[in-house]
Image (cartoon, helix red, strand yellow):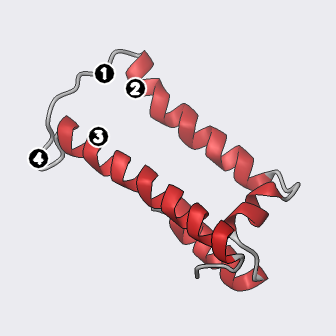
Amino acid sequence: MVGLVGIAYLEGESGQTALQLMASPQVGWQVVAALFIYASLVPVLAGAKMEPFGPFTPKAEIVNGRAAMLGWAALLMLEYKAGVPFF
């Protein structure tokens, strides 16, 4: 969600597609992405238990993550084919 909001804001400001923004030599988004990946892997590598927490079950989180990945892929494909920003 954070990435989608960030890309939507940057597309509105610059008029470039998500692929054009990610190909730019700016390092800021790459550092943030690396920090999010690291923060996501720490609990897994530390041996965190995969137990439900209220409505947040491991199965639901996996499904939501996969849906988000498909959404990103669809956004990138649509922008690539159209050549214009989606937002």
* Helix, strand or loop status at disc 2: helix
Which tag, 4 or 3, sits closer to the chain's start? 4
Q: Residue extending furthest right?
A: 25
Whole-angstrom CA distance, mark 4 to mark 1, is 17 Å
Q: Which mark is residue 62?
A: 3
Number of numbered discs present?
4
Q: Which residue is mark 1?
A: 48
- Badge 1 marks a residue whose secondary structure is loop
Name the image quarter holding residue 46. Answer: top left
Of callouts 4 and 1, the N-terminal one: 1
Evaluate if marks 3 and 2 touch, with contact meaning CB atoms under 8 Å apart. no
Please name the residue shown 67% across and 84% down the image: 12
Residue 58 is left or right of residue 32, and the answer is: left
Please name whichever residue, 14 or 46, is drawn nearer the observer in this view of the structure.
Answer: 14
Q: Earlier in the sequence, mark 3 or mark 1?
A: 1
x 61%, y 40%: residue: 35
Mark 2 belongs to which amino acid? Answer: Pro
Mark 1 Cα shell of 10 Å, populated few (<14), some (14-19), many (≥20): few
Instruction: Quarter of the image for the C terminus: give it.
Output: bottom right
Q: Earlier in the sequence, mark 3 or mark 2?
A: 2
Residue 54 is marked as: 4
**First of labels 4, 2 by sequence position:** 2
The nearer-to-camera label among 4 and 3 is 3
| 1 and 2 marks in contact (CB < 8 Å) | yes
Above or below: residue 15 compared with residue 60: below
Type of residue at label 1? Ala
Real-space Cα separation, disc 3 to disc 1, in angstroms: 15 Å
Residue occupied by mark 2: 43
